[in-house]
Amino acid sequence: MFESVIIASGPTIEPIDPVRFISNRSSGKTGFHLANEAKKREIDEIIFITGPTNYIPSDVNLVHVDTAISMRDNILTYFKEAGVIIMAAAVSDYRSSEYCHEKIKKGNDRVILELVKNPDILKEIGEKKSDDQILVGFAAETTNIFKNAKEKFERKNLDLLVLNEISKENPVFNEDLNQVFFIYKNGIIKLDKMSKMEIAVLIWDEIFKIAEQT
Ligand code: C5P
């Protein structure tokens, strides 16, 4: 059904100096399961664009990236031919405003690091995509989760948003189990807590349903 799909996975890492970086707790498990499930469906080419993670699927067109900017550049390279773009990556929202080519010495008691915003890849793809391309985003929220998620759905021009509520009961990052909500144009569905592998199956089921409707 789809000739080409893009799955962006894992964290991005934003260097500060040759040995230090800013990143996050993303394991890349959800993206990994999404790629494995894609292989079971009628999809000719899976372009898997990933930040550093141990979860690398086999038999995909694999593109390793590190920073948000390198992830963006690679997604833009492949995006026109992709019928589906799934942004499961935990893109770092900020990067250091300067890269220090030498290791920063620990002299001062206080060091101030200035951060600048990274490009919002999902928003950019949402603006550029055509009506027959399906765009899936993720959200990890701790407060006002439905309000924030619905705004995100609209602002980023998504077809499906997978909402994670991060809480003590559902820590999400690096876990095998997760409880998510699917946000669509016309509503919300709460899924039971289940494995990330099972969630990947249901996400692909939704993508195929959306494709049939468009
Ligand atoms: O706005 P927020 O970061 O909560 O949105 C999360 C979604 O946006 C995820 O799908 C993530 O992959 C994507 N994202 C992005 N570029 C960023 C930040 C997040 O594509 N700079």
Image (cartoon, grey):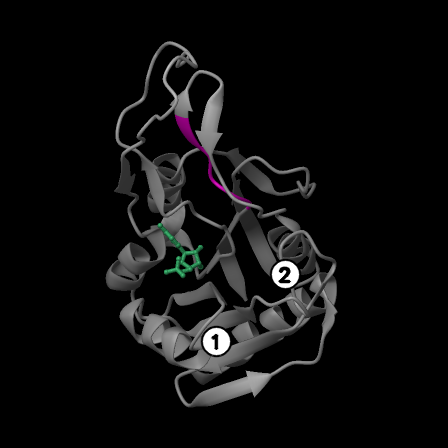
Compared across the picture, whether 87 is left or right of 108 comes to right
Query: Which callout, 2 or 1, points to the residue nearer the camera?
Result: 2
Q: Quadrant of the C terminus?
A: bottom left
Q: Residues within 10 Å of mark 1 (few under 14, many from 20)?
A: some
* Residue 150 rendering spot, x and y as whole percentages: 37, 79
| Residue at image point 63% right, 56% down | 30
* Residue 123 rendering spot, x and y as whole percentages: 30, 59
Report the residue that reaches farthest toward the front. 109
Q: Which residue is mark 2?
A: 172
| Residue at image point 41% right, 34% down | 67
Question: Can residue 11 be found in the magenta stretch?
Answer: yes
Sequence-wise first label, 2 or 1: 2
Determine the image quadrant of residue 156.
bottom left
Question: Can residue 124 be found in the magenta stretch?
Answer: no
CA distance for labels 2 and 1: 28 Å
Q: Residue 211, labelled with which disc?
A: 1
Q: Residues within 10 Å of mark 2 (few under 14, many from 20)?
A: many
Q: Main secondary structure of the magenta part?
A: loop
The residue range painted magenta reads: 10-15
Which residue type does callout 1 highlight? Ala
Which residue type does callout 2 highlight? Val
| Residue at image point 56% right, 37% down | 62
Tell me the quadrant of ligand 1.
Answer: bottom left
